[in-house]
Amino acid sequence: MRTIRQITAVTLGLLVIQCSSAAKKDAPIISQKVIPGIPGAVFIQRIQTDQQPKQVCFHPSRDEIYVTNLGGTAAKSTGPGSLQIFKKSTGELLFRQPAIAAVECLLDLSDENVLYYSDMFSDEIVKFDLVNRKVLYRASIKENNISNFRGTNYRYMPKIIEPDTINKRLYVSMWLDGVSVINSETGEFIRRFPRFCSHPRGLMIEKNTLFVMCYGVPDGPGEIVQLDTVTGQVISRLNTGGSPRHIVRISKEKALISNLNAGLIYLYDFTKGAIDKSLKTGAANTIVLDPGKEFVYVNDRSHNKIYIVSIQEWKILTTISTGPFPTGLDVSRDGRFLAVTNFDDASFDLFELKRGQQSIQ
């Protein structure tokens, strides 16, 4: 059984989510200024979603956007959460797949007709057919003999999904445990690496090493942990403080990491396990690399902003205003569009990225 402290932490987190401030429905006011070489954001529209949208994903070739929604409560039955499919060009809702509490979405790198999403309050990873609009499997992230919390369908709360396309595996971080591994083709549960830090979040696989962003707060230190995927043993720990959240690879040696409670992003050398430098960005949550790999987009959910950061110059070039509590973030593969979910407003904003233009507030 989990300790009272752990269960209380989850309960308090849910209360914070449910008691978030009311959102303004007005679209952001954006003016334009031409600055060569910098992508500027032109607001297209704000699209309503189900409650508490977590992540947003563009399809690489179809006119579709996918949004995973937590829903309003930690209900025991399917209903409050969802996967929603929108038409990118119009904002029209095309399809809604019920979930208990959908968290992260991931497009299959080897098959663009498949999407995975984590359902936090069912302890499952769902493989979804985007062509026929149907569930292909629901994969458990725990052993059959693990009991759920009383009156619920969960024990570990899956979050981020990291694909290993070579070995056909999905690594899944679990808010209340460690990391689970499932077969991406069949959904078969392979193994679980039990808790090795507090609140694992972002993941990155490099050969037999899994880099795990450990959020920490309020139950432990913020850490970057390297885990051996063969033995399950911890290779190293880097205590960062704050709360590391997401990691994005930008080269064969470097990655970018967001640290929400420290208000920083890091340039991280994963071959050395060391932080090269940091940049103040406010409450850095999701980070997304521009397809050209010159810029990174960082959403700051404490100030309702997205920052466009030059990786080479290592500075914020411009900001984009969002709705309240920006959470999910994605850029289309062709670099033409940017989407951000407004967690407290049940909506997402869609922008067109104009190369050579900058948005000024």
Image (spheres, rainbow, N blue to C red):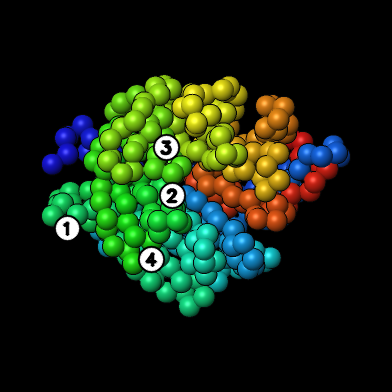
The circle drawn on residue 282 is: none
Q: Which residue is mark 1?
A: 144
The CA distance from mark 3 to mark 1 is 27 Å
* Mark number, residue 185: 4
Residue at position x 56%, y 22% from top?
276
Mark 3 and mark 2 lie on one chain; the one further toward the N terminus is 2
- Label 2 secondary element: strand
Q: Is residue 302 above or below residue 22?
A: above
Q: Nearer the viewer, residue 203 or 55?
A: 203
The image quarter containing residue 88 is bottom right
Q: Position of residue 151 (x, y in %)?
A: 17, 54
Q: Which mark is residue 162?
A: 2
What amino acid type is highlighted by mark number 3? Answer: Phe
Q: Marks 3 and 2, how far apart in space?
A: 10 Å
Circle 3 is placed at which residue position?
211
Inspect the image, locate mark 1, and give the three-letter code of the amino acid beneath it: Asn
Circle 3 residues within 10 Å: few <14, some 14–19, many ≥20:
many
